[in-house]
Amino acid sequence: MRGLEDLAQDRESVAAALVSIGAPRLRAIGLEPPRVLGNPEHRLYDLLAREDQDTAHGRYNSLIRRLVAFERAAGCVR
């Protein structure tokens, strides 16, 4: 998983921010992030805004929905 790898390598990325946001639920399903970013929600938005300010809000919401869907699906597999 790219976010876990990015966190292990101390890389700040969209994937690392998403894993940091989802860390509590990910831990509950057996995925242990090596570390988490502080203030990951703001960092995620800032990273997206750097790429394209006009679409950052929509992309942020879309990524959060995908994260929640992943967490729910993974929780059902347990």
Image (cartoon, grey):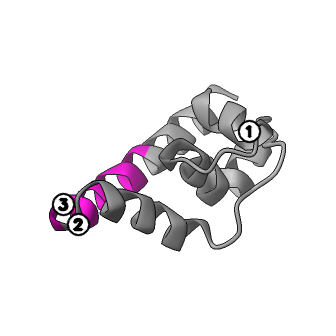
Residue 31 or residue 76, whichever sits in front: 31
Q: Amino acid at mark 1?
A: Ile
Residue pointed to by mark 2: 53
Confirm or deny contact between disc 3 and disc 2 (CB under 8 A).
yes
Residue pointed to by mark 1: 29
Q: Residue furthest left?
A: 54
Residue pointed to by mark 3: 55
In the figure, 31 relative to 48: above or below? above
Q: Residue at x 61, y 46 (%)?
A: 16
Q: Residue 46: horizontal and vertical position, in percent?
A: 43, 67
- Where residue 9 sits, quadrant-wise, is top right
Start-end of magenta stretch: 54-66
Q: Residue 63: horizontal and vertical position, in percent?
A: 37, 50
| Secondary element at tag 3 | helix
- The quadrant the C terminus occupies is top right
Q: Amino acid at mark 3?
A: Thr
Q: Nearer the viewer, mark 3 or mark 2?
A: 2
| Secondary element at tag 1 | loop
Q: Residue at x 30, y 54 (%)?
A: 51
Residue 69 or residue 77, whichever sits in front: 69
